Image (cartoon, rainbow, N blue to C red):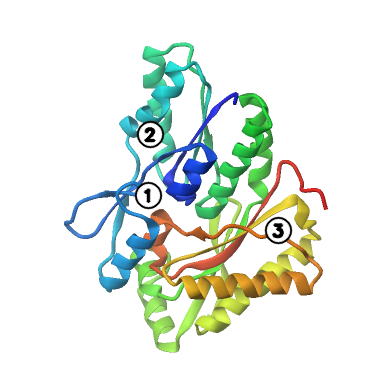
Amino acid sequence: MKFQIVSDSACDLGRERAQRLGITMVSFYVAFEDGPYYREERDISAQEFYQMMADRPGVFPKTSMPTVEDYLEAFRPAAQAGMPVLCICLNARFSGSIQAARNARETLLEDFPKAQVYVMDSQLATVLQGQLVEEAAVLRDRDLSLEEAVSALEALRPGGRIFFTTNDLDYLHHGGRIGKAAATTGALLKVKPLIGYKDCELISDGIAQGRKKSLVRVRELFYRHIQRENLDLNAWRVITGGGLDQAEYDDFTRQLQAGLSERGWNVPVWEPYHVGVTIGVHTGPTPIGVSILPRAIPLTP
């Protein structure tokens, strides 16, 4: 292994998957009202977080980014062992997490002048960031150097897309994503937003009437993207992600896989992803969708 991988918990890998992949994860913090701050995926899991949200309707949680000391704690063991570090952070437009990592790097170099730490802006969020981290692990395990891995990963970022929806407009309004009038009107009409992630930003992909139709529309938007871009899915990572309702998420994933198969697009089975705290404070406990990211090394058909 030629380098150690570090990522903030916005990557939504979850504790077990990160440990299995040999990823050091630095936690965001989440709190409800005047309660204590919990470290994401250390003090509280995504599922526990969503259950707390569901149990406290109308109470909006808040997040805080990792500290410089949090990143130093992650960097020091590798520096002491003479191991280079690749740190992959949430899109810099969304959080100051990457600046904390950069400051930690500068502090680390005071004690370890020869330490190699590359702090990368993933330019991605949630499961897309997680997929980029997983690609980094693939490259690490193929024995690429830090420089080779960075070059390969940076080329993947522009292709990342997400198509998703959420059931509760109040969280989007509270986070400033939509206005009060739109939230009120949407709730009265039972309209659900279709949201995309493209070119480092969240975008509107329209609306749908009701939860079931919104999930159908998310899948249709995804199929249309594959067809329009003429994508060979052997060269892409396809991942679904969801919130609290596991049964709904499983059904969404089965229907997506069936739709892909019907269209002649065969994709290997993927592991489930929980959309984590960092995006969950803006979506509420009901986000669900699908993402796609290029692979550095395409699968063999």
| Callout 2 secondary element | helix
Q: Residue furthest bottom?
A: 189
Calculate the distance from the C-alpha at mark 3 to the C-alpha at mark 1. 27 Å
Camera-nearest residue between 3 and 72: 3
**What kind of residue is marked 3?**
Pro
Q: Is residue 175 visible from the viewing direction of this image?
A: no
- The residue drawn where x is 56% and y is 66% is 289
Alpha-carbon neighbours of circle 1 within 10 Å: few (<14), some, or many (≥20)?
Answer: many
| Callout 3 secondary element | loop
| 296, above or below 224, in the image | above
Disc with the residue nearer the chain's start (2 vs 1): 1
| Callout 1 secondary element | loop
- The residue drawn where x is 42% and y is 46% is 9
Residue 101 drawn at (x, y percent)? 41, 32
| 91, above or below 55, in the image | above
How many marks the image carries: the answer is: 3
**What kind of residue is marked 2?**
Ala
2 vs 1, front mark: 1
* Location of mark 3 (residue): 268
Camera-nearest residue between 292 and 243: 243
* Location of mark 1 (residue): 41
Residue 292 drawn at (x, y percent)? 65, 56
Residue 94 placement, left or right of 240: left
Calculate the distance from the C-alpha at mark 2 to the C-alpha at mark 1. 19 Å
Calculate the distance from the C-alpha at mark 2 to the C-alpha at mark 3. 37 Å
* Location of mark 2 (residue): 100
Q: Give the image quarter of residue 107.
A: top left
